Image (cartoon, rainbow, N blue to C red):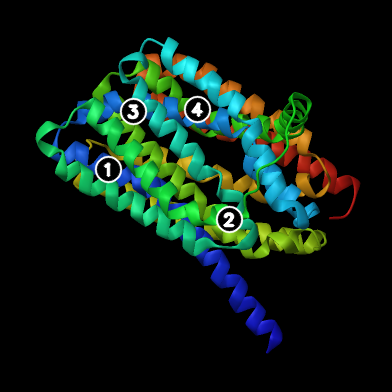
């Protein structure tokens, strides 16, 4: 009974974390649907450049904050408030840099104030991620995301008569502020630290490996979108952002499926691993087929994006490779190959950018999808190859 109750509780937390994680991309996808259907697809295409820019800026501002803090909280649970405060203060220097970037980059200059609001409060909201995950306060996260989505949707209708690019940026800024307000009671854990220049430098240095992993992972997964934002016309860019948003959301199912078995990977032996991999690939194949078909018809009939059957095949090829190497990536982590995994992600990220620059120029959206597929196949080849070497050298 105790084991059963523990499993039920664990499943509840996994379910809540999954809902919390999925709500974030749904926020952007829902607003994109409203803008495309109620106004103009070109407006969303213009906005994607700012969406990509703010994502990169907040990744820089976070500087690997969440994984760094979760590790720090686990090692010193009595110093959570002080550690959280030090990490927050150390990133204020990066915030100053971002203010200058928003002021100096020509495309951002006309929208400096709403972009600064959006970037700042998006970062403020991210400050709570480590606290939410460590204490498993997923209802806070879910409530905040629902409020943010609701405020954004209501704002779209409220400002429908004067909708333009600046208003759309303000809508995302207001939704970030609404999310922060909901989460702000959690600040009771936060403590004002005593900091020095040396302390700030040390904190940024210690969290740099996590920042490097986050940047490599971001470019590896979204490098094709960044290239598309640079090369595609606004209408095609709007369509591709919607497509890639749902494809990345679809990829989360691979991690959700693996979640209940993740701890066991560190204990199982060779035959157990092979059985799990075969089962995982079968589930992955079926779920990828269903997701690809659902996405194909949803984009055509809900978003009114013109597709053909080649897109259906590309959706499958984009989603399935993750199932071929996700378990192996856990094997690398088990055997302390984190640097090797970072190296592989960097290789895949560079491939995504370089190949994307060629293929997007020639084939547009098809080229962007092909670039993402090739990047994932390269990463799969590298990770699976390294996993085989590890498993041949020692038992799992």
N-terminal label among 2 and 3: 3
N-terminal label among 4 and 3: 4
Residue matched to label 1: 31
- The numbered disc on residue 396 is none
Q: Residue at x 71, y 47 (%)?
A: 82
Residue matched to label 4: 56
Q: Do the residues labelled 4 and 3 touch (CB within 8 Å)?
A: no
Disc 4 to disc 3, C-alpha distance: 16 Å
Callout 2: 10 Å neighbours few (<14), some, many (20+)?
few
Image vertical order of residue 213 relative to residue 6, above or below = above
Which one is in front, 310 or 168?
168
Q: Are marks 2 and 4 in contact (CB under 8 Å)?
A: no
Q: Helix, strand, or loop for circle 2?
A: helix
Callout 4: 10 Å neighbours few (<14), some, many (20+)?
some
Residue matched to label 3: 114
Disc 3 to disc 1, C-alpha distance: 17 Å
Q: Residue at x 72, y 36 (%)?
A: 341
Callout 3: 10 Å neighbours few (<14), some, many (20+)?
many
User: Which is closer to the viewer, label 4 or label 3?
Assistant: 3
């Amino acid at each position: 009974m105790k084991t059963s109750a523990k499993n039920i509780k664990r499943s509840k937390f996994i379910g809540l974390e999954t809902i919390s994680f999925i709500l974030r991309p749904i926020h952007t996808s829902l607003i994109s649907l409203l803008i495309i259907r109620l106004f103009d697809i070109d407006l969303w295409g213009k906005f994607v450049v700012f969406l990509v820019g703010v994502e990169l800026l907040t990744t820089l501002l976070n500087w690997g904050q969440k994984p760094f803090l979760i590790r720090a909280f686990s090692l010193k649970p009595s110093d959570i408030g002080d550690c959280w405060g030090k990490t927050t203060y150390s990133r204020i220097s990066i915030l100053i840099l971002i203010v200058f970037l928003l002021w100096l980059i020509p495309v951002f200059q006309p929208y400096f104030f709403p972009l600064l609001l959006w970037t700042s409060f998006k970062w403020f909201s991210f400050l709570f991620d480590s606290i939410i995950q460590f204490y498993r306060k997923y209802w806070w996260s879910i409530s905040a995301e629902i409020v943010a989505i609701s405020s954004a949707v209501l704002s779209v209708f409220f400002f429908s008569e004067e909708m333009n690019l600046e208003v759309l940026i303000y809508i995302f800024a207001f939704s970030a502020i609404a999310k922060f307000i909901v989460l702000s009671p959690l600040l009771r854990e936060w403590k004002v630290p005593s900091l020095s220049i040396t302390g700030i430098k040390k904190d940024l240095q210690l969290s740099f490996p996590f920042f490097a992993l986050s940047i490599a992972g971001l470019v590896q997964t979204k490098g094709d979108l960044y290239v598309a934002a640079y090369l595609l016309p606004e209408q095609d860019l709007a369509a591709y952002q919607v497509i890639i948003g749902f494809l990345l959301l679809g990829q989360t199912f691979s991690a959700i499926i693996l979640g209940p078995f993740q701890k066991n990977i560190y204990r199982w032996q060779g035959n157990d691993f092979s059985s799990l991999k075969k089962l995982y690939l079968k589930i992955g194949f079926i779920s990828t087929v269903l997701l690809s078909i659902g996405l194909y018809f949803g984009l055509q009939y809900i978003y009114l994006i013109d597709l053909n059957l080649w897109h259906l095949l590309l959706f499958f090829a984009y989603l399935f490779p993750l199932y071929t190497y996700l378990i192996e990536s856990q094997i690398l982590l088990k055997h302390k190959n984190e640097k090797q995994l970072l190296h592989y992600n960097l290789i895949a990220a560079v491939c995504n950018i370089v190949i994307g620059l060629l293929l997007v120029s020639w084939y547009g959206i098809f080229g962007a999808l092909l670039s993402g597929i090739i990047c994932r196949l390269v990463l799969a080849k590298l990770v699976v190859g390294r996993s085989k070497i590890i498993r041949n050298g020692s038992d799992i």
